[in-house]
Image: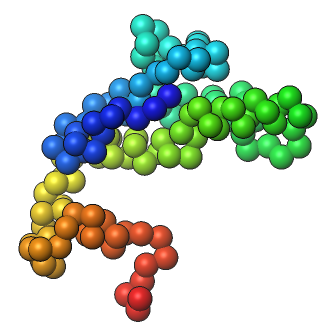
Amino acid sequence: MKLVPNFAELLHEIKLPSPEKCFLIEDGDEKYIGKWIRNGEITCELEQLFHWINMKYKLKKNNLSNEERQIAEDVKKRFPTEQWRVIKIFSDHQRKYRYYKKAIEDVKSRTSPRMSEQAIMTIFRPGWSINT
């Protein structure tokens, strides 16, 4: 499973599809999530899918057999088990509010017109504080 190649472009143009359509199914994914795929697309909500993946493949467990550990590692490599929430947040935010671009433009006008969008986004990085 991989992110649609034009995700950043769609994000900035405020044209993201539903979270489930932000991901493309790759060959071999059906081995792990076949019950959630129809016609090459995810048939449930992204949150439901990743909750099921975590439970089915015991991704949060530490005491796994060698076979279970290998399967869990394969699943972690194949699916964005840690990143899917960010994609869902961006997609849901745009679908509900459509504020992303407006917020960036507002921050830009209040800080520096020359400040890039990437520089603005570093304001939100973990660990940042007013004293840094």
- Vertical side of 82 occupied by 132: above or below: below
Number of numbered callouts drawn:
0
Q: Nearer the viewer, residue 93 or 125?
A: 125
Asked whether, in this view, residue 112 is left or right of residue 1, the answer is left
User: Residue 1, can we see it?
Assistant: yes
Give the image quarter of residue 49.
top right
Residue 30 percent location from the top left of the image: 58, 15
- Vertical side of 71 occupied by 82: above or below: below
Q: Quadrant of the C terminus?
A: bottom left
Asked whether, in this view, residue 50 is left or right of residue 118, the answer is right
Asked whether, in this view, residue 99 is left or right of residue 37, the answer is left
Residue at image location 27% in from the left, 36% down from the top:
6
Asked whether, in this view, residue 73 is left or right of residue 98, the answer is right
Name, please, the residue furthest toward the bottom: 131
User: Residue 55, can we see it?
Assistant: no
Residue at image location 83% in from the left, 31% down from the top:
68
- Vertical side of 117 occupied by 36: above or below: above
Name, please, the residue furthest toward the top: 39
Residue 80 percent location from the top left of the image: 54, 39
Residue at image location 46% in from the left, 32% down from the top:
2
Residue 14 percent location from the top left of the image: 18, 43
Residue at image location 56% in from the left, 34% down from the top:
79
Residue 37 percent location from the top left of the image: 50, 14
- Indicate how the structure is coloured in the image: rainbow
